[in-house]
Amino acid sequence: MFLADGYYAEVTLPDKGPSATGLWKDEGNAIAYTHSHMPFPDMMMANELKRLTVEERTPDRLTTRNYRGVARIFHRCPVNAVKAAVGQAEH
């Protein structure tokens, strides 16, 4: 999940929480990012900058390949796709 403020979180929807976080920046032909797995044993150390090479970009889909050559595909979620947990009024 890429957030507009430059942070991202890896989540497994619909019912698992975040497993990693980092910073990201769109470089046009690549997405530069840092990466830390929870529970963050390396939290106080500088993270290596990695890149996802952009192969295809449409308004609703981003097809990339990571530094190992593995495809990573991102989809734009509809506004109502992520809902607050039961008993929680809003995000």
Image: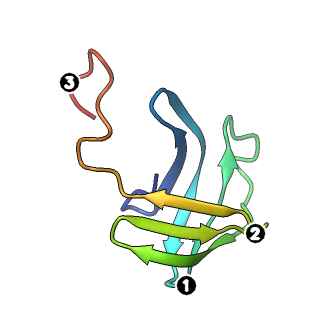
Q: Compare marks 1 and 2 and give the one earlier in the sequence.
A: 1
Under tag 1, what secondary structure?
Answer: loop
Along the line of sight, which residue is nearer the eye, 91 or 41?
A: 91
State the mark number for residue 88.
none
| Distance in Å between CA atoms under marks 1 and 3 | 39 Å
| Distance in Å between CA atoms under marks 3 and 2 | 41 Å
Q: Compare marks 1 and 3 and give the one earlier in the sequence.
A: 1
- Residue sitting at x 53%, y 69%: 63
Q: Point out the frontmost of discs 1 and 3.
A: 1
Which of the 4 image quarters holds residue 14?
top left
- Residue sitting at x 66%, y 72%: 51
In the displayed structure image, the side of residue 59 where residue 65 appears, left or right: right
Which of the 4 image quarters holds residue 52?
bottom right
Along the line of sight, which residue is nearer the eye, 61 or 67?
A: 61
Above or below, 20 relative to 31: above
Which residue matches tag 1? 29
Q: Residues within 10 Å of mark 2 (few under 14, many from 20)?
A: few
Name the spot of residue 71 as percent of width and height, x first: 66, 64
Name the residue at the top extreme.
87
| Distance in Å between CA atoms under marks 1 and 2 | 15 Å
Which residue matches tag 2? 69
Q: Residues within 10 Å of mark 1 (few under 14, many from 20)?
A: some
The C terminus lies in quadrant = top left
- Residue sitting at x 58%, y 55%: 22
Q: Residues within 10 Å of mark 3 (few under 14, many from 20)?
A: few
